[in-house]
Amino acid sequence: MVKLSPLVGCIITRLHLTFSLRWRLWPSTPINPIRRRTWTGLSAPSHLPLLSPPSAATRTRPTMSLDPPTYLASLQSNIRQRPIPWEGAVRAGTLTEDQHAKIRAVDKAKKPGQRKEIVEADLDGYRALFVGGNGKPSVLETAAKQANVIQYILVLLADVLDAKALFKNPEPYTHFLPLLHSNTTEDHIPLLTSHALTTLMALSCDESKATVQQALPVLFTYISGLAKSTDAGLQDIAVQEYSTLLRSHASREQFWNQRSETIAPLIKILHSAAGVSNSGNASATLWSGSTNGRTAAAEGSVGGGVGLQLLYHVLLVLWQMSFEADEIGQDLDTEYDIVLLYTHLLRLSPKEKTSRLILSTLYNLLSKNQTSLLPTAVLARLPPLLETLGARHLSDVDLLEDMENLKVMLEDYTKTKTTFDEYVAEVQTGHLRWSPPHRNQVFWAENARKILEHQNGEIPRQLAEIMKKPWDNDKQVLAIACNDVSCLVKEVPEKRWQLEKAGLKRRIMELMQSEDENVRWESLRALGGWLKYSFEQTA
């Protein structure tokens, strides 16, 4: 896979951060003069301001903001305006005279430009103020017990310090990482620390061991706690900080390595948006189609009360991860049913902006994992959904292009696949539905032996794995599996030993006691066929 060079990634990050603070972007508007960019050969929607600023028309439209969340911006503003008795802090030994002088110099300058000039005139001095060095302690050390001073310093850090200057210190995070830990939910220091570190890491484009292996894992762990919160505002802060950090292969790799912390909570948010309960088997609910995604929701939100802005930002993070599709795409689907989930979200998507990110992510994943993921996309009924979307009056150029590319890819795949291939692909997903082959006697007559011999008996073993699960939320899976075993026994009775060796006969006997009427019937039918051929062989 082709990777972005550190220089290109750094330029992109700086431009993104600069423009996201300057304009409130409306993602559906292409950015001229270059409509579309491609990162690593994958689909890249043009709404991210990578090269040129949006037009005046773009800036005046109502938006899903990429600005800092309101809560965080308000907190920072309050801290900037809060009076602090600096002289008293010096007398108490909380600050040194030198630290006090540097803080006051910046504090007196009300305009951002003036503050920048003051800091740039003494970069070494201000680096020592924030991270220490040359025998001088950091202000985070000397003022460790003064929460009001620490909060002010963290806001000041995000405001004025040149990130490159900070990283001249070989251990720039020594005094920051402990601040991410707090015993009280009312303590704002961890939140301010995560915001400051996120901004500094993104602007510096630093991929040193200190950043990637030491600081980034700790920061991801803290942010994941925000993402797991029931507070939508904290969740939005989390996903925006994730998005800011995921600008390099190294950061995306670490994000994936911590996926139980980082990705899993985002998938839960998407499940809620899709109307899927996180208390049961989400996969079974999605395959069965029994979601509540169309239930009434408050204005500006989707199913489960997930806000459109939060949904958009979660989709943005996973779109960024899709640039690692050739390395993580298959596992992403195996662990989180991402193709099925995204197909369902596309069906429910209320805005072209969210639809575009969904389509772009699907294209990135499918194009890099065609053998493993295209069968799932077909079973999830993505092709007919794309046809339905194509009949709508859509205006987003990127969305239309990705949709057309997906159509062509899926058409090329389905042209070469037989009904046998479709059946094998369905079993390999680990979830069965009443697709045409299951009730087609001609299919079983022509393919039963082939199914048993495929990859040295892999399909019966996979059926056994499927039947081991209770499927409390989707009992029809067990009924379908029993039906398939019955058809195999009927068409190839001499191979019953192979099915019995896989544990299928024992499991069918257990399912005769199922509370579900259809499961009992199909298991009884399967066992009846088994016993019939056993009696005939005996006779």
Image (cartoon, grey):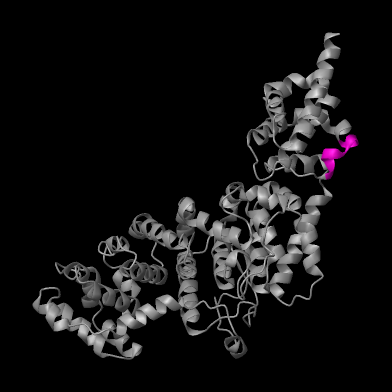
The answer, for residue 97, to whether it is visible in the render is no
Secondary structure character of the magenta stretch overall: helix
Span highlighted in magenta in the image: 436-443
Q: Which percent across, then down, holds residue 369? A: 66, 51
Image location (x, y in percent) of residue 529: 82, 23
Q: Is residue 170 left or right of residue 416?
A: left
- Residue 440 on the magenta segment: yes
Q: Would you identify the image quadrant in which residue 411 lies?
A: bottom right
Q: Is residue 116 above or below residue 330?
A: below
Front-lying residue, 230 or 19: 230
| Residue at screen point 58% across, 67% down | 305
In this rendered view, identify the residue nearer to me: 121 or 507: 507
Question: Is residue 441 or residue 508 the one in the foreground?
Answer: 508
In percent of width and height, residue 174 lies at 26, 61
Q: Residue at x 85, y 26 (%)?
A: 491
> In the displayed image of the protein, which residue is found farthest to the left?
91
Q: Above or below — where is 5 with respect to 534?
A: below
Q: Is 143 drawn above or below residue 477 in the view shown?
A: below
Is 2 a magenta residue?
no
Quarter of the view holding residue 475: top right
Q: Confirm whether residue 439 shows in the render.
A: yes
Left or right of 60 on screen, residue 19: left
- Left or right: where 199 falls relative to 106: right
